Every structure is written in structure tokens, then in C-alpha cells.
Amino acid sequence: MKRTRFAGDACPVARAVDVVGDWWSLLIVRDAFIGRRRFGEFQTGLGVAKNILTDRLRKLVAAGVFEQVPAADGSKHKEYALTEKGRELLPVVVALGQWATCDATPFTPVDRETGRPVRLVFRSADGRTLDPRDVRLTPAETG
Amino acid sequence: MKRTRFAGDACPVARAVDVVGDWWSLLIVRDAFIGRRRFGEFQTGLGVAKNILTDRLRKLVAAGVFEQVPAADGSKHKEYALTEKGRELLPVVVALGQWATCDATPFTPVDRETGRPVRLVFRSADGRTLDPRDVRLTPAETG
DNA sequence: CCGTATCCATTCCGATACTG
DNA sequence: CAGTATCGGAATGGATACGG
């Protein structure tokens, strides 16, 4: 029996899990957000086996999360850059980080211009900020 | 060789992945947000094998995401309710949902009081809403 | 330095059968 | 309905050796 796949599932969470729902993919994406781009940077930074890293990078490229860009420092090797779709994973990474943070946080989301820290929050249509506990999930919203 | 674990990792994302970074856990949590509480509801709704579901629920209870509450309709069985820590996973679920959404969304986050839809956004300290692409991750922020 | 290919242990998953 | 026990197959993950 094969493991069930969720790529064609109606639920977006399920489809997302199908792409980044393994132990390494999200950590690679996180490293990319910190600024890592090279195979070796991911490899030594995460301590992941090289074949695993190869596999994950390939899948993430196929999923449109990363793209291979030709150079950067002039070397003949490729680098891995987040695509637009990949950069849109930032809320996921930050949400996970906010959830599990205890005290020592190795990274913080900041405003790109001012450099000041930002938070991930829920916002209603009229601009109010809501506490997560004031938000609920409603199934099959039509409209 | 055992699979590497991240429970003691400094990175909160890694620790989060250690808890909810498998295929089923996040989907169970998602179902819980929609309102599912019973073993059978998870089982038929997700189509997961019962032994797997047993294992995941046990681990999620041990991780403090779920707690077993005595009753609800008077039956002698237990139900699974999200703890405070579990409810704080809502941004993660919503972020994943927002990322993978194409058109058909089986659920939407709404304001618990007004019932109107809400979005997950970045907010700066002075109250401005930032686009994800205007946010970057800075490593080892001190302060 | 950047990957690829192979090998092997572990783990995971799903089906089934069984108990209360 | 709510679980537990077991079992076989599949996929994963890690180490290592190898090639550009």
C-alpha cells in the first residue's frame, strides 16, 4: 500500500502538507529566508544528508517554491532562490516560529525598510486586529 | 540509523516541525478547528487508519496540543479538545491554507463575533499592515 | 564545491482482526 | 463507537562512495 497523497485534495492545508509536510522542506525554506542560497550552506547548516537535500531541493523546485539561478559570485554553480510562490511561505514559517518560541529565537521577522520587528496577526475586513482565539474556522464558506 | 529529531533544536520552526511536521497531525488539528472532536469523526473524515490516528492523537495529547475531555453528549467516551496551545496553531493552519488556496476553499477563517472573513497579515509595531514581501527574516535578533 | 548513485536500517502506513 | 495488536510492504532517511 502506498502512502496517501493529498495533491488533489480539496483542502488547501492538505495540498500544502503534500509539498512542505516533511521534516526537511520547511527547514530548507526557513534557511532560504535567512539568506542561504547554496547547496553547501543548506547542507552544513541543517546537517542533512546530501542525497536527502538533493531530493528535497529537486521537489521544491518542481513545486515552484525554489528556482535555480545561474550564479552570484561568478562561480559556475547554481544557487537556489525562492520564487514568488516560495516567498509567500513566509507566513507559514513565521507562524510556526511564533508558535514554538519559548525564549531563544534565532530569527525574527522585521520590516524590510525600517528593520523593526513585525508580528503575524489576524485582521478583519474593517482593519481591526483580532486575537487568534477570536477567530474560528467555518467550513464550506460560500462567497 | 534513526531519523533526526528536532525537539531540542534552537530553532522554533524545527521544534514545531518535530510535533506537527508529519502528514497527519496538522490535518487532525485542522479538523479540530472545524469542529471535529470524536475519534470516529477524525477517522472517517480523514480516511486515516485507526492505529495511525490513535498514535497521532496520543502524541498530540502528550505534546499538549489536545486534551481529552470527559463527555459532551453524555456518552461514556472521551472527546479530543484543542488546548490553549493547540488553538494557537490556528495561524499555522490558516497560513498553510492561504498559501495553497487556488479557488475552492473548504473553510475560511472568520471573526467569531461578526462571522465576517479575516486574513492573516503582518503588522508592524506602529500598526501598519505589511505585505509579506516587505518582511524579511533577520537571524539572531538580540532584543 | 556540487551533486549523484547505491546500500541498508528504520520507520511509517494501511489493512485486518480483535476487545470492550 | 473507540480503541488496541499485529503484520507486511513501501517509503524514507542516513552513510558512504563516486563523478563533474
Image (cartoon, coloured by chain):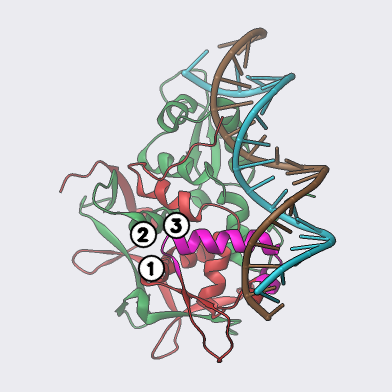
Chain colours: A red, B green, C brown, D cyan
- Residue A102 visible in this rendered orientation of the protein: no
SS category of the residue bearing label 1: loop
Q: Is residue A2 above or below residue A20?
A: above
Q: Does B125 appear above or below B62?
A: below
Residues at marks 2 and 3, common chain?
yes
Instruction: Give how far apart the Cα atoms at labels 1 and 2 are.
Output: 7 Å
Which residue is tagged 3?
A: B92
Judging by the rendered image, the residue that carries numbered circle 2 is: B99
Quadrant of the image containing the N terminus of chain A: top right
Where does residue A2 sit, x and y in percent of width and height? 55, 34
Closest to the camera, between mark 3 and mark 1, is 1
Kindly identify the amino acid type of the residue bearing the numbered disc 3. Answer: Val
Q: In the image, what residue type sits under mark 2?
A: Trp
How many discs mark residues in the rendered view?
3
The answer to whether tags 3 and 1 share a subunit is no
The label on residue A88 is 1
Q: CA distance from mark 3 to mark 1?
A: 13 Å
Give residue B116's mark: none
Where residue B118 sits, quadrant-wise, is bottom left
> For residue A77, which quarter of the picture?
bottom right
The structure residue drawn at horizontal position 45% and vertical position 29%, both measured from the top left corner, is B47
| Residue B52 percent across, percent down from the top left | 59, 32
Q: Is label 3 in contact with label 1 (beta carbons under 8 Å)? A: no
**What residue is rendered at 41% in x and 86% in y?**
A112
Q: Are marks 1 and 2 on the same chain?
A: no
Q: Which segment is the magenta one?
A: A43-66
Q: Residues within 10 Å of mark 1 (few under 14, many from 20)?
A: many
Left or right, residue B108 beside residue A115: left
Q: Work out whether residue C7 or residue A26 is closer to the camera in this orientation and state it.
A: C7
Of labels 2 and 3, earlier in sequence is 3
Identify the chain of the residue marked 2, using the numbered disc in the image.
Answer: B
